Amino acid sequence: MGVANDIGALVLTPDNKSEAAVGYCTLYGDAVGAIAPLGDCTKRRVYALAEAFNADPPSWIDSAPIPASVLEKAPTAELSEGQTDRDDIPPYEVVDAVVKRYVGDKQSVERIVSETDTTREQVETVVRRLARSEFKRKQTPPALRVTTKAFDSGWRYPIAASYAEIVGTEPENGP
């Protein structure tokens, strides 16, 4: 951020909607910046965009700009050796589906469970983490909106109140 300020540039935040939903971003780390160009894209959409970019790179690039090893590596917050995101959260196919339905379509936990192949535990894990991570989303840069409901435009979830669809869910930063 300091270098960007010195040269009059903006820092682009690599945050995406799936990671923001479950709190997989660090404030003053990967969530720092001026704008989040991928902030309204689910994790799977980010991968699809990367694969499309690799399939048709700009003419001034000789090879795939994003190494295959990056796309093939299991997603990880890299907080400890050998850690993967699936150690703590459901697969991103599930996270993405729950975020789309719960945030974008305002569906209840009951409806998501009944209409998808997800388990109640998976849906409740995502919704619980979504509630507990709101304080982080309030501090991250704005995202470029590409869906009907981005976290920063039209999504409002109380930070200080103890409202939650799942009983016993309290914000991560206190009751």
Image (cartoon, grey):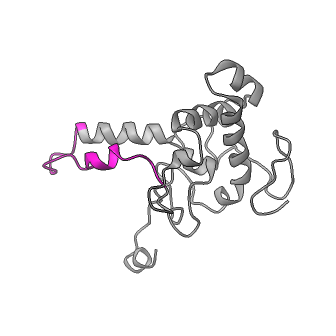
The x and y percentages for residue 159 are 79, 56
In the figure, is residue 35 to the left or right of 63?
A: right
Looking at the image, which is closer to me, 2 or 129? Answer: 129
Residue 43 horizontal side relative to residue 134, left or right: left
Magenta region: which residues? 55-76
Residue 11: give x, y in percent of width and height. Answer: 44, 66
Residue 39 visible? The answer is no
At x 81%, y 53%, the residue is 170
Left/right placement of residue 151 relative to residue 124 reads left
Give the residue at x 74% y 47%. 156
Q: Where's residue 9, x and y in %?
A: 40, 70
Q: Quadrant of residue 26?
A: bottom right
Horizontally, is 99 left or right of 66 in the view?
A: right
Residue 61 visible, this orientation: yes
Q: Position of residue 75 (x, y in %)?
A: 45, 48
| Magenta stretch encompasses residue 63 | yes
* Residue 104 sits above or below residue 35 on the image: above
